[in-house]
Amino acid sequence: MSPPVATPDDAAAAPGTRTGGLPAAVRRIMLAGSLVVRGAPWTALPYAVLTLAAGALPVVIAWLTKLVVDGLVAGVALGTLLTHAAGLALAGLLVAVTAHVTQYLSTEVDRAVGLAAQERLFTAVDRFIGLVRFENPHFLDRLRLAQQPGGMSPYPCRAVDGVLGIGRTGFTIIGFLGSLFLLSPVMTGLVVLAGLPTLAAQLALSRRRARMIWEIGPAERREFFYSGLLSTVEAAKEVRLFGIGAFLRDRMLANRRVADVAKRAMDRQQVRVQAGLGLLAATVSGGGLLWAVSSAHQGRLAVGDIMMFAAAVAGVQGALTTLAGDIARTHQALSMFDHYVAVTAAGPDLPLAAAPRKVPPLRTGIEVRDVWFRYSTRHEWALRGVDLHIPHGQALALVGRNGAGKSTLVKLLCRLYDPTRGAILWDGVDIREFDVAELRVRIGAVFQDYMEYDMTAAENIALGDLESLDDRRRIRAAAEQAGIDDTLSGLPHGYDTLLSRLFFSEDDRQNPETGVVLSGGQWQRLALARAFLRDRRDLMILDEPSSGMDAEAEHRIHASLTAHRGGQTSLLISHRLGAVRDADQIVVLAGGRVVEQGDHRTLVAAGGDYAHLFALQAAGYQPETDRSPALTEGVR
Ligand SMILES: Nc1ncnc2c1ncn2[C@@H]1O[C@H](COP(=O)(O)OP(=O)(O)OP(=O)(O)O)[C@@H](O)[C@H]1O
């Protein structure tokens, strides 16, 4: 029916473990090149041309210097001397100018490509329809590495830069080697031989560094997690109350140390290798110089030849080191680019129907048929053969103890996961056959862990249906239904008031009336308003919609829900059983199974789990003397 679904670990191979060799590297370079050209069509080409041309300049300068020196020694005409000197000055000017222009062009290319690369990356992330990938630590590591670190050149640019660097340095090497060959073929061979270990060693180092960066990923993720706890307002209360700041800081630093140890070992190995390579280069160039001076003394070389020789040996050695660095940089950039490619090219996380069916308005109801689900093979079953029918136009309530599987079932209904076994049918059609975006348009939901957006009050509601972003009437109607209209109208800038103080401009900083923080219950009503905005919804899911509200607000919300239900299909989850007693059907889940089902009266009469929990809660609202001893025992 559809392309194979990627497993959660599909994108988790460590860099350096990939096979494919040179052809794969060439393919990735082509991909990086095409991203760069598409991202910065007007600047990429001049940048590439200037970068490559800059490689020939050191050779031109060395030749012109030799010509000037030889001319002086041989006493050639002043006009010729001045022509060579002018050429030398011009070459010097070009070196200075191209350096600045390429620097500017490089930054321009980085900016344009960085923007395009981020857009591509997050468009790809948005294509994952489920939650599986976001719960996979390997994938999260990849995503973190695939993002452009602030202020750094984007990975496609770094890969292309590396290749251009190789080209530029290649020009320099060929020019100098050619010049050196004219003076001493033996010395040319020696310089090349001395350069090869440098190349090999730098490549090995770069491969190790890429692997090390991957291996310290989990430690860096944990460090980031602990630093987040120490610096976010959400955690600040508990951190202070429980006095766990130092504990969390120690854990953060311990993870930093783990990463530092790996980095230090890598740096030390690099220093050792590079010192050895430096010694080799110095020996070759020192020996060569002795040979050149003694040859000049015997009249076999001119003075200009010695200068050319010294420039060529130093130039080739320097360029070989640069080349090794360029190759290493390219290799490293390609390893990092792998993460980017893995995320942007990752297959669907849930199977997509090859020819998705239209989602019709709900007519008969939703059936959960023998649904089994576990979050992964390493987890226990969260749902164990759940059978449920939510008839069209009815309100079904789902109750049960913590961990019974209620929220899991909600996530399956929204197709954030697929059942491991069994199916969910919408008017008899498996929801996997629908276009998921279309299905979700037909569902309104308030999750237990709803979001609080640092945006204006109107935007916070309009996110429920972006078409209403400029439709204040609809936004207010949804807010009224959620009982939050008065509060929002009374804010300093009404519905245009920014919620939370996290995003404020300099002007706002001076104005204490902007950037309002709402209470928990008010945020929850805002989340409800967001769900109410979806007026095309056929199924309304409310997972603990009133848990943070005061008693009066909760009563009003449920009265409003009942009044607006008007034949709408809804699924309500609540631990406050008083809130669900009016539901047409109440389903009790326990251990991932349906254990009881019926309306309130039937379930109370049955005297099972529901009746027990209901009696416990009811006892809490009765005077001390009215409580039955059995119940108060149970409460204790
Ligand atoms: N993302 C997840 N990954 C792995 N296991 C999970 C995940 N979410 C929930 N679980 C597990 O699935 C089981 C059911 O959890 P679920 O959240 O559906 O329960 P619930 O009935 O909604 O509980 P509560 O009343 O506390 O909200 C629990 O054992 C829980 O630990």
Image: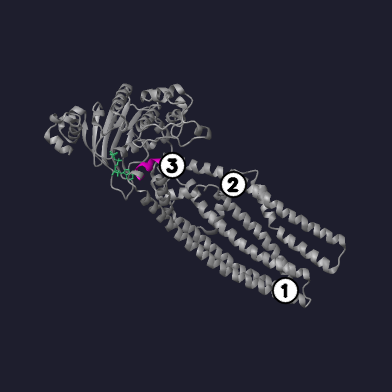
Residue 366 part of the magenta segment: no
What residue do we see at 62% from left, 69% from top?
281
| Side of 636 where 392 appears, left or right | right
Q: Name the residue under label 3.
A: 128
- Residue at image position (51%, 62%) is 267
Q: In the picture, residue 361 is in which quadrant?
A: top left
What is the span of residues highlighted in magenta in the rendered image?
233-239
Q: Disc 3, disc 2: CB below 8 Å?
A: no
Q: Mark 2 points at which residue?
A: 110
Determine the CA span between mark 1 and mark 2.
45 Å
Label 1 C-beta lies within 8 Å of the nearest ligand 1 atom? no
**Residue 216, image x, y percentages:** 44, 56
Q: Look at the image and tell me whether residue 435 can be seen.
A: no
Is tag 1's residue or tag 3's residue first in the polypeptide sequence? Answer: 3
Which mark is drawn over residue 238?
none
Q: Which residue is nearer to you in this view: 426 or 202?
A: 202
Residue 354, image x, y percentages: 43, 39
The disc, 1 or 2, on the residue closer to the chain's N-terminal end is 2
477 left or right, relative to 423: right
State which mark lies toward you, 1 or 3.
Answer: 1
Residue 518: percent from the left, percent from the top? 39, 31
Task: Name the secondary structure under disc 2.
Answer: helix
Left or right of 315: which side holds 11?
left
Which residue type carries mark 2?
Asp
Name the residue beneath numbered marker 1: 292
Asked which quadrant contains residue 538, the reply is: top left
Nearest the viewer among 18 and 112 is: 112
Looking at the rendered structure, the kind of residue marked 1 is: Ala
